[in-house]
Amino acid sequence: MASFFNPGFGRKHPNQYADRLPPGQYETHDFPVLTAGPTPRIPIESWTFSLTGLVDTPVTWTWDQFQALPQQEFTVDIHCVTKWSKFDTRWHGISVETLLEHIIIKPEARYVMAYSHGGYTTNLPLDDLRQGKAFIGMGVDGEPLAAEHGGPARLVVPKLYFWKSAKWIQGLRFMAHDQPGFWEQAGYSMYGNPWTEQRYRSDD
Amino acid sequence: MARIEWQLGEVIAIIQETPTVKTFRLKLPNWTAQLPGQHYDLRLTAEDGYQAERSYSIASPPEQLGEIDLTIEWLEEGEVSAYLHEGVTIGDLIEVRGPIGGYFVWQKTMVNKPLLLVGGGSGIVPLMAILRHRSAIKATNPTRLLYSVRTPEETIFGQELDRLMGQDATFSRTITYTRQAPEHWTGNRRRINKEMLAREVGQYTEPPLCFICGPTELVELAANLLVDLGIPAPYIYAERFGTTRPT
């Protein structure tokens, strides 16, 4: 099929960041909203974040405790499976590695289920959350994260398609084996690497 | 699971639905029955190898064997939609792969449950697939559609919706015009609001399953209002699009 092309079709707008754009993606300057159901409303008083599952002692933070953890700034490209990519998004939040300093993970843990207020889940390999590769985002462009974008806090894993960056994050559950989360059960990739176009389960 | 492979569909019909919306009917060499609400990915390739991909909802029901209808709105800045609208004629080949999507779908298990569809603009497309399939299988679950459009001439599938309502007492559709209503129109002429949704929800004896598709703001608003009106969140299926304008 390599020889097939659509006569007369060509790039409409040259993209200066073409080498930063994974296959099948286009650049957007908006910040589109994509969620399966209604936006959950999470009162800050009852917000918690937990590290659970295969850990020696689970830990839970309240919003105030979580805010007091060391924060950093992150500038990252994000790639949504619905085909848009956005370059140089500026976040502030807490590196997952910073959170992991508060627990001891059991040796058999290899995977993580990120789970959210509202019931959303998504699965990731533990390795992809470590060493600064992932963070909990609490704001964009210096502003608090809006509810429709996953506020007050969402997971951000820039190297994977953005559905892995669970909105309204409530915690990380450490697991020995990979298990499908919400979209993964609905036919999306278990891993979601934008650079190899792992969009759907059959692409794995 | 076998990879969902790209295939070359042949354009066998092009239907001008509104001034800015066309339906492209593709005959597929490897067609598999889709669930209403699913989509196909479509990929255009330039002679120099440059490719662009988009996802488009299927408008046709699975009863339409061997082919799919993709109903596509022309977006001014849209690289793909502009090519399809301006550069494609009958007999052309288009690369697609699908059907895709396991969430925003009207499943067999939902057939006997009351259903509320809320659509805005070209968000009607996956909802139409549900209505067409529902009609084909002669389902009798109470079903209502609240459809927000700018003007009468921008109403996609308007006549077909009228016809469906005329022949099926268990289906009813309400249109609201947000920019300009027809002459002598006595119905809604504003964006979807709480009052409008309350009137819809009030027609059911039990909470309906809700499928909402349209521009982000409409979907966000409608989903939140339906929660306010007492619909349990798991009953609400939302598909948002429209804020992404390809650059």
Image: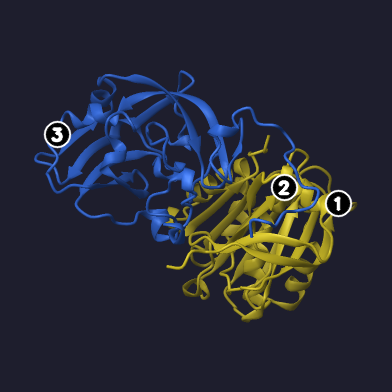
Chain colours: A blue, B yellow
Residue count near mark 1 (Cα–Cα under 10 Å), binned few <14, some 14–19, many ≥20: few
Question: Residue A102: x and y, percent?
Answer: 16, 30
What distance separates the C-alpha of mark 2 from that of mark 1? 27 Å
User: Residue at label 3?
Assistant: A103
- Residue at image point 39% right, 60% down: A185
For mark 2, give the secondary structure: loop
Cβ atoms under marks 3 and 2 closer than 8 Å: no
Question: Residue A73: x and y, percent?
Answer: 39, 19
**Most foreground residue, A41 or B189:** A41
**Most foreground residue, B197 or A16:** A16
Identity of the amino acid at label 1? Pro
Question: Residue B93: x and y, percent?
Answer: 74, 62
Q: Nearer the viewer, mark 1 or mark 3?
A: 3
What is the residue that sits farthest to the bottom in this orientation?
Answer: B138
What is the residue that sits farthest to the right in this orientation?
Answer: B183
Q: Quadrant of the N terminus of chain A?
A: bottom right
Q: Is residue B222 left or right of residue B90?
A: left
Which chain letter goes with mark 2?
A: B
**Most foreground residue, B168 or B239:** B239
User: Residue at label 2?
Assistant: B46
Residue count near mark 2 (Cα–Cα under 10 Å), binned few <14, some 14–19, many ≥20: some
**Which picture quadrant has residue A128?**
top left
User: Residue at label 1?
Assistant: B19
For mark 3, give the secondary structure: loop
Q: Nearer the viewer, mark 2 or mark 1?
A: 2
On the same chain, marks 3 and 2? The answer is no
